[in-house]
Image (cartoon, coloured by chain):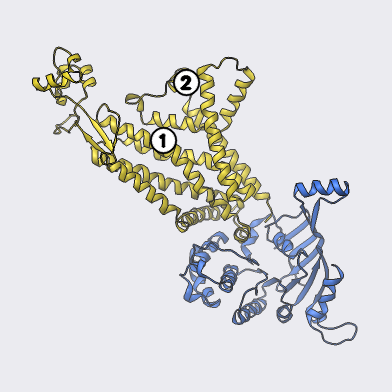
Amino acid sequence: MNLPLIIRAIRWMIYDTFRQSLATRLFWAMVILNLVIVVFCFSIKIRGDEMLPLAPGEIPMRLNLQKAIELGHEKALPFGMVIHPIGVEWLSEPLGRIIAKKEGLDIFDTKVSLGFGLIELPKSKDRVDAIRQIHVWLGGIVADTVGMFLVLIWTAGFLPSFLEPNHVTILLAKPTPRWALLLGKYLGVLFFVFLQSTIFVLGTWLALGLRSGVFDRLYLLTVPLLVIHFSIFYSFSVLLAVSTRNTVVCVLGSIVFFVLCWGLNYGRHAVVVLQIPGMSSVSKTMVEIAYWSLPKPGDMSLIVYDVLQADSFSMKIPEFHELQKQGKFQAELSLLSSFVFAAVMLLISAREFKKQDY
Amino acid sequence: MIKAIATFTQVSKYYPLPWGISLWKKLSHGVSEPTKITALNQVSWSIGTGEVVGLVGPNRAGKTTLVKILLSITSPSQGHISRFDRTVDDKTTLAGVGYMHENQHFPKYLNAEKLLSFYGMLTGLDKKIIQERTPKLLELVGLADRRNEPISRFSKGMIQRLGFAQALLNDPDLLVLDEPSEGLDLPGRKMLKEQIKLRKQQNKTVLIVSHGLAELEEICDRVAVMNQGKIVAERKMKDWLLDPKSGKQQTLEQAIFPLYQTQQ
């Protein structure tokens, strides 16, 4: 095996995929889509918790009412919060506000809107939590679910067009092993997704940060998570491409597979948590086998949620909470089994590609 | 005796019929109906070092399959093939082979220069060598002035020229050309013939698959005729051009034409 040749070939295949994405205009189409979301994030408006002057060791925020009560009068004061000694009940709307104003109390009352005031978000606890909540939506729903689905569809045509006989035949007559060509193309698509994820995450992080002053670095961890998640699903698309060389089959197959895995993943968790009456142990075993054998898009959303430490400001779906309490969801095992799936798919694809006649 | 650069021993290639057709044939014609297509049937043949060999035959004779097996693009169903004295499973020997495909599709987003770099890298050539050879080859095939133009703007003839440059990039010991003059204009054909002759002088081997018999007549040392998956005749060019019955000169087309008909 000529290792330097293989490394160079893989590098060139990655570069070639990037050029392919530029030529098909997919790269720029996705950049534009990402920029639209970035602009949307830049339109965020937060009112009611203006920043206080920074002093050494001081958190540049006011506390919200609930937290201030938890901390107590003395501890809350440095944050610019004053709690009336008689409690908070009378501060409730609308009378409480009038009294508070009379008493000269400083009430934290954050309002968050997006789309230059068009969309008013549910009242958040404070500025930091409001932004972190948006991070969870962006990372867990926009990117990891909708984005993943779209990218799978859009990139499904990359390999079939590469494997088109009149194109690939000349490459196959080169000394580079076939598996290296395939791996290079696979990594090339991952690199493309990495670039797009970085633009999305970094762009939204900066936009939200610049407008709110909140730069939560945990959000940046969603970039590797998105690439990992995509790499698992794309391995199935690779197998479809090698076996059929057909873009339509790849696109439709990827969609069906993603939806199937999504349903199975949530279905399994429902089976575990809800203890569906009348379900046989054979059915439960089959669900478990399917869960552990296939990629787990639902688990990935949970992992994103946990990585962003969203527990402190956002309520998890109660069933998921219960699942974790029961110890039936382990992020490491979930990821590992998904990686095994991806590795098996790639090995089968490489084997299939090796024995195929062109 | 000329040393063989490639040898085929009892090589056969079968393609299975699609399962639907296969099932229909079995049901309608009985179990004995073949469920595979024979593309090559027990071919034993060799190509010698420094030779310019032509491979001709009617459509679906198995010429392209033979070439693809030689280049490890397709695997044989039976038999043994050696390339540079090694089995064709050893892909490293492809570093000494150049191949021009009959209907090549290059990535349209590349330009001529980048395409040669890309294929050169996959052949295992050093960057320096690629940079050195690329302008010379583009000059040779008449594309020097279009080196930075996207391939999407290239005509069929230009693509052929580029394909030829690509095949020569590694200065191969074995050059395999499948229908090389397809779509080429007269200067292009002239350039192609000159290059093949030049390679012959350098003791390099060239295998040409072509329907252009007049061109083969000019450049080949030897021509083999394939039909129905077999090599049905093989002679040196001077022997083809001499009618054994009358002792008169004949064209390659006149000599070969009966072989196309008898086997069909």
Amino acid of disc 2: Leu
Kindly state the secondary structure of the residue where label 1 is placed. helix
**Residue at which label 2 appears:** A323
How many numbered dots are placed on residues in this image? Answer: 2
Left or right, residue A231 beside residue A93:
right
Amino acid of disc 1: Ile
- List x then y, in percent, for residue A348: 63, 42
Q: Is residue B109 above or below residue A326?
A: below
Q: Which colour represents chain A?
A: yellow
Pick the residue in front: A258 or B244. A258
- List x then y, in percent, for residue A314: 34, 26
Chain assignment, label 2: A
Kindly state the secondary structure of the residue where label 2 is placed. helix
Which chain's colour is blue?
A: B
Measured Cα–Cα span from mark 2 to mark 1: 20 Å
**Residue at which label 1 appears:** A141
